[in-house]
Image (spheres, grey):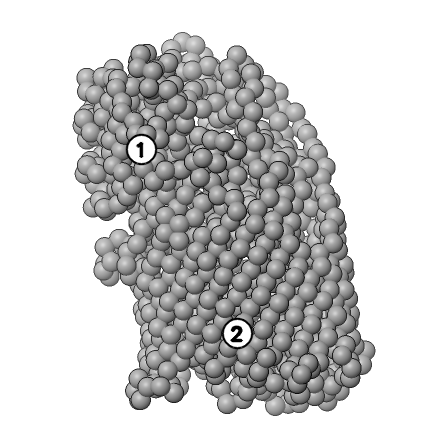
Amino acid sequence: MQRTKLTFSVCQALAIMTGACVVGYGTQAHAQTSTPAPATSTPASAPTAQDSSAGGTGTADDKKKASDKKVTDLSVVTVSGQLDAIRRAQSIKQNSVNTVDSISAEEAGKFPDPNVADALQRVPGVSVDRSGGESDQIAIRGFGPDFVAVTINGRQMATASGTRAFDFDVLPSDIISVAQVNKTSSADIPEVDIGGVVDIQTARPLDFNGFHATGTAAGVNSNLSGSWSGKTTPKVSGLTGWTNSDHTFGWLASVQYYKRDDTQINTQANSWYVNQNISQLSGLSNPKYTNVAIPETLANNVVVEERTRKSFTGAIDWRPIDRLTFKFDTLYAGYRVDPLEHEFGEYGNSGDFQSLTTDANNTVLSYVRKNTGVMSNDYVVAYNPSNEIMNQNGLNVAFDFDPSTVLTLDVSNSKAWNKESADGFFTVIGARNVGVNPTWTNNGDNEPPSYTNIISTTNLNDLYAHCCNAGGQSNNVTEGITEYQLNLNKSFDSGVLSNLEFGIQENREYNKSVDLTTPDGILCNAYCGYAVSVPASVVGAYIYTPPAPINGVSQPGLPRQWIQYNALAYINWLTTPAAYNQLTPAKRTALLAALAQYHSFGPQPDPGSFNEVEENNKAAFAKALFDGTLWDKSWTLDVGVRYLHVDSESQAIFQEPTSYYISPTDSSAGQVTYGPLQPQEAMGGYHKWLPALNFKLNLTDNLIYRFALSKTLTPPELNNLYYNQSFGTRPESLTISQGNPELQPYTSRNYDMGLEWYMNDVSYLALEGFYKKVSNFSTIVSTPVEFLGQTWSLSEPINLNSANIYGEELTFNYQFAHLLPAPFDGLGMAFNYTHVNSSATLSPGTISTSGKFAVPGIGDSANLSGYYEKGRWQVRLAYNWRGKYLESIAYGSGAQPENRTSYGELDLSASYKLNNHLSLFVTGTNLTQSHLYDYSVYPNRFLYAEADGTVYTVGVRGTF
């Protein structure tokens, strides 16, 4: 096999590789400059639109076949600029056989977005979940994060999210060479999921010539006001590498560091309790006060955060002989969030309602509480840190038996963990509202509710101990994946059969979760109830002034100041005689006995919270690629089948409550004591055949018709496979939740069709339709059970329902170079809109008549951006919008639906090239200062609102 020393430009590489995709076996195109790549597929290099696996060196037969295909000629394109990134992404889509969309880096290590999810939101059909001023998880065509598979260079990546959903915010966007969204399945794609498969492809050493380096230094400013103010923090990144002259060896390394100080305002109700019999609970006699829906609380939060993202990537490519290629990759990424929460809370309790009003839906509109002090002003200080770390190492070996036959072996290991549970805390000091009648008002569909007529929130001489817990704010999560893939690829240079590919794969995966907290609720059992006076001086209490309230997020009439304190000093004081000598003798004795047993009130592993799920996935696939002409129109058919066999084991430690009682000093709090620990385990599993067909017909050189059929699946949610039980002990809502290790996966039969018109290499119009018949939805079923002398609601997931998900996707990208005179010929625009419908909707009537079932995440999304690139200037202004959608079927302790209203934000990125090596850039995120807003069932059942403000980045970039 001949090996050339001349590196191709990025567009030449795309033309060669996407041409190979059209004729054969479908490796996905590199986004950077590259030497000719082979007609093989292994997971270590940039996958093609058809296949998420990586390749080695190309063959003469492959290049000949590529040249025979009608592909976009990119040979005159240079490797820089947003216009070239658009050109590369369009080429990948145009030359693929299955339906894909992608984004490409403007150049190595250059993306204007802070993380991978923020970058992906520009892809048609992709929408994001936002919080804390960044995106963290994604949905594809309405299917939420649990329905989206994610690979890095074709390999499954572990995540410490605690669910199947991948936390994209851990990964900086700088690592992306190409991020590709596979919307239809192909048998050789190593992961399958109903929503789609996202493959993030990093740069390869042999994509470059000789020594090369890039670097970025910037300042980041985040604030609620929308102006540049407050603390500015650093963002730096660098990429460097070297490739020898004959392109047989190269290395590449990159580092990123990002820090952002952020202040967030949020208001929340936590949950809604429905079917409440208020007359029974509070002694009211009016019969219309039955089946009432009431909120759990009204919590007003200011969260001061420090967010730090660090990453390192490394890669080595080596071709010791023409027929043998080694590729090694390593990735390390960490994302730490340190959020200190200053909260003023007003907890609900229907037991002391004095009067109330409701609407026609039995939603409470207002209520007045008694003046006996059942409601307290809660001054909360909480800390729930997160430090999610993920790393992946992979080795890919490709051997060419001959120019048309390639065997590839890929071995990888990935691990992720988040072990900050012990460092968190949640503390409450309060003051009872004695002598006043707190009054709650529902403020309608667009504003949080409010309380009036409460006692002073700044009286430092009226403080009492309440809830307190060290640790326990989130679980420690560890996940590991070991993966093996072996593929054999055979291409043919004559006849209709273009390529055959076979492969086997094994994934061994585990996920562990455990909580570290004050054992057995010791502190709360002793102090909850506002009975112990707290001197302000011993806990460092002070008057806190929050940021100015924000309309639509802050509750109307929110106090402009409230009390805060040193939470750790407070927890330490609770262990002193000055505190526990105020307890009743029984509580004091129990507290001291627990201290003698555990030697500390600090966080310790809670055995009853332990869960582990182990899965062993074995798969095999066969795929054939056919191509030819029909009435002088070229066509390509990709057909194959994947067989998947999964064995799973769920382990937990069960601790059954032995008694339940309501706290005599706080009638809103139920407390339990637990019996002995009981380890338990259960087995599960399934096996499925997953066929896939993709057909592509070039009606003209620039008009493409696509059709696809496939069967895909999504594994059961991890938390639904957990085998332990959890107990909700609020008197208004006694609940028991448990998992089901025998759950089967969601399965879907998929039908896709599309038409694409390519006007030039940066302009196209596409209309695509999709229809998914999804079965085996996990549905939460609740049953009343008698336990410990009370009626509890026992909830567990079962495979019960099915739904049809269908919609359309419109994409229009256009560059105005041929329409407008200079200097306006640098203008361009990109627009996409995805409309999604479901046969299963969670309307109030559905809830009351047939139980809780719907598909979370289903909703429309759209993106509109305008860009300008001319001379030294590049500018992009983008509006990203997501329509209202269901976030959760059963949210909070009331287990009621959570809906998010529509959200849109405006982002800006611009750069100015000083010379061939240096450029200045600026970005602005959420220039519109949009905020999030959630409700339950009806819009006037407020759940959550959040404001994060605007993030600016200004810096300099160098390329050498």
**Mark 2–mark 1 contact, CB under 8 Å?**
no
Please tell me which residue is depicted at 60% across the width and 44% down the height of the picture: 802
Label 1 CA crowd tier, 10 Å (few <14, some 14–19, many 20+): many
Residue 51 visible: no
Label 2 CA crowd tier, 10 Å (few <14, some 14–19, many 20+): many
Please tell me which residue is depicted at 60% across the width and 49% down the height of the picture: 774
In the drawing, what numbered circle is on residue 756?
2
Nearest the viewer among 60 and 799 is 799
Residue at the far front in the pictured view: 631
Circle 1 sits on which residue? 298
- For the N terminus, the image quarter is bottom right
Nearest the viewer among 891 and 665 is 891
Residue 67 position within the rendered picture, expressed as x and y whole percent measured from the top left: 65, 88
Q: Is residue 368 left or right of residue 85?
A: left
Residue 234 position within the rendered picture, expressed as x and y whole percent measured from the top left: 36, 63
Residue at the far right in the pictured view: 401
Q: Is residue 865 left or right of residue 11?
A: left
Please tell me which residue is depicted at 35% across the width and 53% down the height of the picture: 903
Nearest the viewer among 425 and 128 is 128
In the drawing, what numbered circle is on residue 382?
none
Residue 939 position within the rendered picture, expressed as x and y whole percent measured from the top left: 34, 40
Callout 2 amino acid: Glu
Q: Earlier in the sequence, mark 2 or mark 1?
A: 1
Above or below, comparing residue 600 to residue 223 in the picture:
above
Quarter holding residue 408: bottom right
Callout 1 amino acid: Leu
**In what element is the residue under mark 1?**
strand
Please tell me which residue is depicted at 27% across the width and 41% down the height of the picture: 447
- For the C terminus, the image quarter is bottom left
Q: Nearer the viewer, mark 2 or mark 1?
A: 2
Quarter holding residue 196: bottom right
**In what element is the residue under mark 2?**
strand
